[in-house]
Amino acid sequence: MTDSIESRLQEARRQLAQHGQQDLLRFAEQLSAAQLEELLADINRLDLPLIDELIEGFLKAQPSAQLPDKILPPPVYPIEPSAELAPKYQQALEEGQKLIAEGKVAAFAVAGGMGTRLNFDGPKGLLPATPVRKKVLFEVFADSIRAAQKRYGGVIAWYIMTSPANHETTKQAFEEKNYFGLEADNVVFFQQGMIPCFDQEGKILLAEPHRIALSPDGHGGSLRALHRSFALEDMARRRIEYISYFQVDNPLVKVIDPLFIGLHALDQAQMSSKAVMKEDPEEKVGVLVLGDGKVRVIEYSDLPRSLAQQRNDEGRLTYELGSVAIHIINRSFVEKINAHGFSLPWHRAQKRVPYVDTHGQVVDPQEPNAVKLETFVFDALPLADVSIILAIERAEEFAPIKNAAGADSPESSRRLQIERAARWLEKAGADVPRRPDRTIDAALEISPLFALDVEELAQKGPLLPPIEPGGSIYIE
Ligand code: UTP
């Protein structure tokens, strides 16, 4: 060991000991010089005072949620406008289309998650997700963007947030697939921040004897990463004003929705949300409320039971607006909160994280073994002066892929995609084969380039091919 390495090792030991993390160097003597350099570099990147705060404030005990004093149901734009609202919806639609045509709207996919529940080897965006063509998720969104560009005119730049764990694989896949038909120049990748993973006592885990176990800092990290990377500047250069935020795991998302964009813009909102109607009070989805005058999301686990169960005069849940992680965010809002400094609360989650045991062996646990801390993007909602909510039909826009099997799995998502295609086809006048129990007896997929919505499909009704029972059909 050279003097320089030796002295840096001593300094690292001293620093770590002050914060109770000296175990990170327990294999130091067995490492090669290059490995030790890597480990010291990892250690140098740690913000130890911040980590102490996180451990005390959020890891040892998740602080009980700071519930607002006054909780009310928030105002919401309904799925179908009332007669009074119909002209506003029309105006919003036109405004949204205009903003898209002027290139003022960007698509933004957060794709930095580890997808631990899915058990898929690779970035989630590369999971084959559609029922017939088995398009990977990124291709589904790329097709929607191409279709929206064709329909509204203008260029829609697409920003994709990755993490250091999947950045290269993601970029490489886009290169290999020719950016799924988009201009390479209009697809912008940037990386989010990472934070160490901890054991239950708050000790930082090693992923290998010479590497710290790190994980992305949550989708809330996107608001800082947009600023720290060149992405916000790139948006400013392109004169983008609105960011259409969505998650990589929802193939039914309307990547660009002129109505949502238009309502948000007309109301001069800074960060807005789409919501689905909760039917079951126990459903594990965050709920949009008006808390002390601000729109915000309360996690299902934090919503007092009495409120979760409460029903209004019409018999519907009073707090029925489930958050689906679809937002419009103003570029200027992200700039402003970063300029003034902001912090989002950290949430702890138990996750599966490969780690090095006391013998120096890497263990790949089958059950959650580690604590990860994450920030959530919706926690920024109360920072907005104006925040609108647009209710959407769940079956039309939400088919998340989270788990390997069961609910919210590739299989359940495929079923929802087929059901939506069938509804659209039937409305467009096609005969969809159904079994006696009314389930659909065909695999159906409609290319966004053929029809972005049911209205467009209906216009093309005469072009629709017949669908055979048991068949598999891709409409393009
Ligand atoms: P989830 O919270 O479902 O997490 O992310 P995940 O990482 O995909 O899956 P699990 O929990 O490990 O199984 C919702 C969305 O937010 C993105 C994900 O990529 C997904 O689109 N995300 C999540 C990030 O971009 N960064 C993060 O740090 C976390």
Image: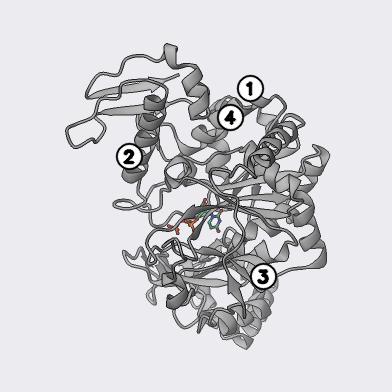
State the residue lying farthest toward the left.
436
Residue behind label 3 places its C-beta within 8 angstroms of ligand 1: no
Mark 2–mark 1 distance (CA, rounded to whole Å): 28 Å
Residue 144 drawn above or below residue 222: above
Tell me the quarter of the picture where residue 142 sits: top right
Q: Position of residue 171 (x, y in %)?
A: 58, 39
Pointer 1 residue: 150
Q: Nearer the viewer, residue 232 or 435?
A: 435
Q: In the image, what residue type sits under mark 2? A: Arg
Given this view, does label 2 or label 3 mark the residue nearer the observer?
Answer: 2
Q: Disc 3 or 4, which lies upstream in sequence?
A: 3
Q: Which is in the foreground here, disc 1 or disc 4?
A: 1
Q: CA distance from mark 3 to mark 1?
A: 48 Å
Residue annotated with mark 2 = 415
Real-space Cα distance between discs 4 and 2? 27 Å
The answer to whether residue 29 is left or right of residue 268 is left
